Amino acid sequence: MLLIRNATIYTMEEDGILEGCDILIQDGKIQQLGPNLGAEGIEVIDATGLVAAPGLIDAHTHAGGGFTATGSDLNEITDPITPQVEAIHSIDIHEPSFKALHRAGITAACFIPGSANVICGTGFVAKTAGKNSVYDLSIRNPAAMKCAMGGNPKGYGKRGQAPATRMGIASLFRQALKKAQDYMAKKEAGGDTPPYDAKCEALIPVLRREIPLKIHCEQFDMLTAIEIAKEFGCDYTIEHAWACDLYADELVSGGGSLMFGPIGIPEGVGELTGGDVGLVGTLDARGLNVCLVTDGPICGADVLLISAGEAVRYGVAHLRALAMVTLNAAKGLGVDDRIGSIKVGKDADIVLFDGIPALETSAKVITTIIDGQVAYQR
């Protein structure tokens, strides 16, 4: 058991901010919230003067996936359609970019394949410390089917292979989903079972709406992504979403979560425009589930909290910005029943800050607690 004593708690729930409150933790779960809770015979952390917030959640990262200047273990670039590959087989929890996560207050993240292919493979949600195996850290696998529009998969054209254009990407995307749809229908019809197809099997959870399409896209590619998801009745999330303000009506009516970021892109032409984090404010105000992401290790783990702070600087209400890296992210990943807020019954993933996270630039991570265990102490 563990008792966090006398913290200012940002619950991210309807009860909002609790001043001078205790958190009682048992068996990795939050057991009780309230003032002056009993502490006899248990470990106590004095959080007087500190802020307790839910562990941060990065809804889009490649940390631990061996990203280098020459390649990555998360880009299977031998085929533009690879739904059957799984990111969990390429994540090294001992890699520096992975170990940096919990030190930055990130207690859970969605680890996904890169964006070299049209359909890239499945991602998973995992805690960022506390176990010796990535499989033991995992709390949802598969969690999403990573896909990509735009410039990245167009790279196949340089090798004389489809896709070389945006229309080629959309065509291959549709072909793969249609093939899987027909395959699933034959399996469910109860007649002769079709020959086993690993790609189609991997896409069945998408077609059954058990996991979403997690679609890398920016600019007008977002419209194509929404159109294809709607055509096949799939849930989806929009990843990166630069220039999302230009397509606000379509994004809001489509209903898929928006995973915005990373911020600080070098503005150029085409896809490399519209990375201003202030763009998310209007979409959030209109009821869209907005999250902020690092695309790590493209950006470091510290950038997640910086992104929320930048959203505040651009006019997003503080608690709304903090939700974008906690509860909203958990909702977008389908794990809000376990993480994303400080609530009795949820996992005890809590970060103690010296300062108010996402509001005060001087706020520092003091202690990171994952499943009720101290994973990092400053």
Image (tube, helix red, strand yellow):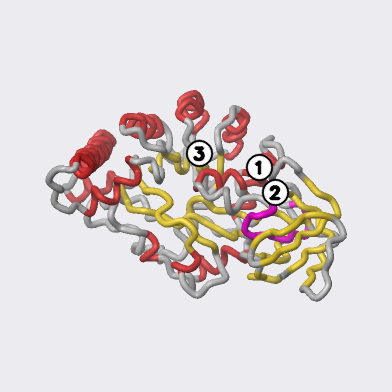
Tag 1 or tag 2, which sits nearer the N-term?
1
Q: Which residue is mark 2?
A: 358
Q: Nearer the viewer, residue 74 or 274?
A: 74
Residue 163 visible from this viewpoint: no
For discs 2 and 3, the disc positioned in front in the rendered view: 3
Main secondary-structure element of the magenta-colored stretch: loop
Q: Which amino acid type is shown beneath numbered disc 2? A: Ala
Check whether the beta carbons of the residues at disc 2 and disc 1 lie within 8 A of each other.
yes
**Is label 3 in a helix, a strand or a loop?**
strand
Q: Residue furthest top?
A: 249
Q: Which residue is mark 1?
A: 321
**Is label 1 in a helix, a strand or a loop?**
helix
Q: Report, in whole angstroms, how far the alpha carbon at label 2 lies from the one at label 1.
A: 7 Å
Residue 210 image offset from top left, x and y in percent: 40, 45
Disc ID at residue 280: none
Residue 282 image offset from top left, x and y in percent: 60, 29
Q: Is residue 73 above or below residue 8?
A: below
Q: Is residue 82 above or below residue 39?
A: above
Magenta highlight range: 343-356
**Dot 1: few (<14), some (14–19), or many (≥20) neighbours within 10 Å?**
many
